[in-house]
Amino acid sequence: MLKMKNNLKNVILKYFLLFSLLILGLLWILQFVFFKTLYKEQKINDIKTVANEIKKLQNTNNYKDTLNYLALDKSVCIEIDNSNYYSLYDSTYFGKGCINDIPTTYKYKVDFIENNKEKEVYTIRNQTFKNETIVYAVKLKDNNYAFINASVEPVDGTLLLLSKELLIITILILILSFALAYFISEHISNPIKQMNHSAKKLATGNFDVEFNENSKILEIEELSKTLNYTKNELSKIEELRRDLMANISHDLKTPLTMIKANAEIAKDLHLNNKEKQIEDMTTIISETDRLTILVNDILELSKMESIKEDLTKTKFNLIELIENIIERYKVLQETEKYKFKFIHKEKEILINADKKKIEQVIYNLVNNAINYTGDDNLVTIKVTKSDNILVEIKDTGKGIKEEEIPYIWEKYYKNEKKHKRNLIGTGIGLSIVKKTLEQHHYEYGVNSKIGKGSTFYFVIPKEK
């Protein structure tokens, strides 16, 4: 049996109503369970307050008027007698708490006066009204005695009125809670439903969707901004993926076409021409090497992105490493007239890093400089040692636009959409450079001016 899932609106409504019912339940419990106890404590405090006031005001002007006011204000009954049980004062307030039956009053008065007590509290049953009554007896000056009494049970009319009011309040709170919960749930759930609808479109590859960032709820607004950022990044990734597929297809197609063409020429046209066959075979080998480099670079980048590969650090001479790399381009220097300028003051700079990976970084940066340098075919490599070691590889090409610099480290990103066949290496060298330098935690970047070339650099920090 499938378990039904609640939508956000119903969940908010449910919890809001449960909260309201909890509050109302507490109010009803306080009304019918604790109200009498609280009322009793309050009446006892009122009686004691009146008794203290009577002691202070004894024999003062307007004494009886003040007693009348206290009796009415605190809803108590006050009686003052002398030692002969003669009533000197009896309050004009005759509420449900006042004791009118003489046998009951006579008992506690005799007990208090005959035993010469200073103060005493009596709890009795009022025979007239059949309710619990508290009597507070206190001795005054001149052998006079004050007896203050009041019912400690709420008046039935008061309880009935409170019950009616509580019922009305309960109905109003439930209606208001439902209305408020419905409004809040609509206010929260509608933007989320819209985001969900747009997110489903985004999942199908539709990058034209827009998430509304003008919500009055901070968290929803931030989520919308995050989704818009995600959408834009996914759109870039999708564009890069298409470019990557097109560029890889181009880089694969060209050498394969040349291999096939040269193989057919060697077979059909140059069958008896040994010299021409050697040229054809050389071209085939060269293009095969290019394919191997391309496949190796793709595999290397894929491995770096999918697996966190550990570095194998060793100490080696950076200057010697760069000189060995430049030596590899001897054929280019002779055939294509490329010039390599290596600037350094030290003959030896020892660093502790993954030699194979740093070699690949420098090799890829030099390849990039070869592919984009100017008509002078000059590539400059410069190593400067101070607190840190700065490695720079400079070309004299057309430069990179400032807005394109953040994207040049992406796979096959071109500052011109039209794909150009690289003279050396592949179009994913800078991606490998980025991954490797980030593995080493080296700072890296590029400085470029339009028409004056670009300088790629990375910084090897001083060992601590």
Image: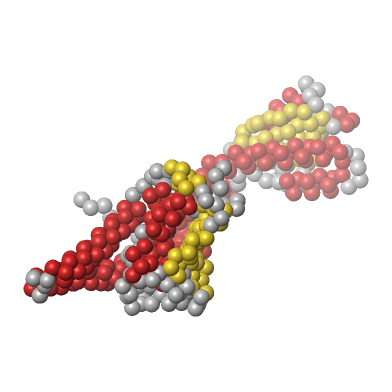
Note whether residue 208 is visible: yes
Relative to 371, residue 65 above or below: above
Instruction: Report x, y in % for residue 113.
Output: 79, 25
Residue at the outermost top position: 115
Closest to the observer: 359 or 335?
Answer: 335
From the viewer's perspective, tell me whether residue 239 is left or right of residue 376.
Answer: left
Q: Quadrant of residue 230?
A: bottom left
Instruction: Please state, as top left, top right, bottom left or bottom right, where the C terminus lies in the image.
Output: top right
Closest to the observer: 118 or 195?
Answer: 195
Instruction: Report x, y in % for residue 279.
Output: 19, 69
From the viewer's perspective, tell me whether residue 234 is left or right of residue 150.
Answer: left
At 88% across and 31% down in the image, what residue appears?
Answer: 141
Relative to 18, residue 286 above or below: below
Relative to 310, residue 392 above or below: below
Instruction: Report x, y in % for residue 363.
Output: 39, 59
At 49% across and 47% down in the image, what residue appears?
Answer: 351
